[in-house]
Image (cartoon, rainbow, N blue to C red):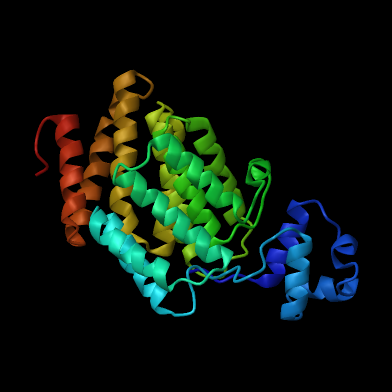
Amino acid sequence: MSNYRAGDIIRLTRIAIGMTQEELCDNICGIQTLHRIENGKVAVKRDIYYRLMEKMNRIPEQNYAVCAGKNMELLEERIYFEDAVRKEDYHKAEKYLQIIERKADDNVVTRQCVKKMKALIAFYTGKITQSELVDTLKEVIKMTVPEYEVYYERGYPFTEQEILALMSLANALDRNESYEESKKIYRMLLCCLSMDYMTSDSRIDLEITIMRNMANTCTRIGEHAEAIVIYKKALDMSRKCDYGRRYTVLFAEMAWSMLQEIKSGQRDSNDTKKAEQYLRQAYYIAAARKEENLMKITERIYWDAFGRKLD
């Protein structure tokens, strides 16, 4: 879970909505106080923070907590829920969701998180359509950022919960073949994360995930050259941060995009050897990390591309 610098959140939100320091601090605090808060020279008092956020139409309550609730057990239940979803055990995920709903408090951030979970489970279990999922996820975002679309072309300091909800929306749009809107959201999120207001390593993890998802979208619509550029950036970031678990997927997906370009004549066939090398690297890293599922995926891509097993 990410930590945020309150002063950065206030400053970046103010800039994003086009408000001056004078306008924001009027009847709340002195301009020098606001200046010092925004620059991290003084801690913001709770009542001033609330009033500043409300004036910018930003939800102030529990703004940086996700499912904190009245009981920290909720955080544990959320982890179990997400693990069940990753394993596609939706029956178990629904059970954890019921526990979360029963224990959760009524602040808007918790309600936002729960509504997103319910929408995803409803889709995965066939209770709602892809289009209904998109509509619901848009409602989820608007619970805390009603006009999120206006920030497609400019930065906005979304919280981690808002970023995760927007990522879910972009993925749903991608599955709904609304590729350009999906890419707009990914670009917006990368712009958001470049503003550097998160203090934890999760910012880097989020950035790599977003780049990978965006590259996958590019691949689906045949923009393989752009996808490869994005994959390389994500790999460079993974290397610098020693995110070994990311290498396998990124190498394999980049190799697949290269092979598609070669197949369509957009890339020199001499690069086939490089693509094969990437697949081998992906496989050996997965093997070293004992990630059997990723080993099988890489083997399948290799077989489809070269008609033989990895040796």
Q: For residue 87, say whether it is visible.
A: no
Q: Looking at the image, which residue sits at the far top?
A: 265
Q: In the rendered view, tell whether residue 143 sits above or below residue 225.
A: below
Residue 91 vs residue 55: left or right? left
Q: In the rendered view, tell whether residue 226 sits above or below residue 23.
A: above
Residue 244 vs residue 172: left or right? left
Residue 195 % position (x, y): 64, 57
Q: Residue at x 59, y 45 (%)?
A: 188
Q: Quadrant of the C terminus?
A: top left
Q: Looking at the image, which residue sits at the far front?
A: 102
Residue 251 % position (x, y): 31, 46
Q: Residue at x 34, y 33 (%)?
A: 257
Q: For residue 248, say whether it is visible.
A: yes
Q: Nearer the viewer, residue 189 or 159?
A: 159
Residue 31 % position (x, y): 89, 71
Q: Residue at x 86, y 63 (%)?
A: 21
Q: In the rendered view, tell whether residue 301 sits above or below residue 240.
A: above
